[in-house]
Amino acid sequence: MKQLSLNIIDESIVKVIASSSYDFRIEIIKQIGKSDINNIIDISKDLSKIYGNHLLITEKNIHKYFNENTLPFIARYKNNIIGYIIGVPLEYFTQESWCRYDTNLNKKNTMYTYAFIIKKKFRKKGGFAKTLKMIYLNWA
């Protein structure tokens, strides 16, 4: 596994995976930038309200999940992040004791969905969550 780069850049390096004519797009983050960190942290607060603080993204752990070894997809509407989904390969967890018992370890065929959230005001509107999840699943 590559060493995580903590060289913080201003703008995120992304690849647009899908976009529509009404200002909605799905991007995969190659490297998170300062301009997106606070938005991701704010959105994760909604997720932690539902599932607890263990899913809270902070400045200390954001690079653990938004890096080149994971699959962090974000949804943007009118250039604002409205949600994200993070896929993490099983092999990423080799230091965790539970991982040793997974029969798929080292087969590179298992992806865990670490977190999936859409801002509350965009849920059940416009198919944003459904589109984000479908693109993530197809990509994974």
Image: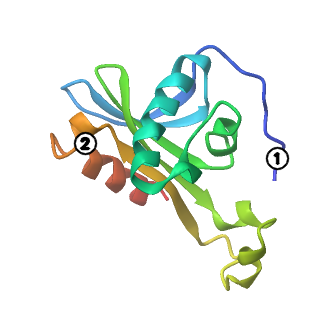
Q: Whole-percent x and y of residue 14?
A: 53, 29
Q: Nearer the viewer, residue 140 or 32?
A: 32
Q: Quadrant of residue 78?
A: top left
Q: Residue at x 53, y 44 (%)?
A: 72
Query: What's the residue at 67%, 82% (across, down)?
Result: 102
Residue sitting at the far left: 125
Residue 121 x/y as whole percent: 22, 34
Asked if 72 appears above or below 6 in the picture, the reply is below
- Per the image, label 1 sits on a secondary structure element best described as loop
Which quadrant holds residue 10?
top right
Q: Please name whichever residue, 121 or 94, is drawn nearer the observer in this view of the structure.
A: 121
> Label 1: how many residues lie within 10 Å, few (<14), some (14-19) or many (20+)?
few
- In the rendered image, which residue does mark 1 sit on? 2
40 vs 4, left or right, is left
In the image, which is nearer the foreground, mark 1 or mark 2? 2
Amino acid type indicated by mark 1: Lys
Q: Residues within 10 Å of mark 2 (few under 14, many from 20)?
A: many
At mark 2, the secondary structure is helix
Q: How is the image coloured?
A: rainbow
Which residue sits at x=72%, y=84%? 101
Residue 119 placement, left or right of 139: left
Tell me which label, 1 or 2, sits earlier in the chain.
1
Callout 1 touching callout 2 (CB < 8 Å): no
* Relative depth, front residue between 136 and 114: 114
Q: Residue 23 appears in which quarter of the rendering?
A: top left
Q: Position of residue 81 (x, y in %)?
A: 39, 28
* Left or right relative to 49: residue 89: right
Q: CA distance from mark 1 to mark 2?
A: 32 Å
Mark drawn on residue 127: none
Placement of 72 over or under 79, stated as above or below: below
Q: What's under tag 2, amino acid-wise?
A: Phe
Identify the residue position indicated by label 2 in the image. Answer: 128
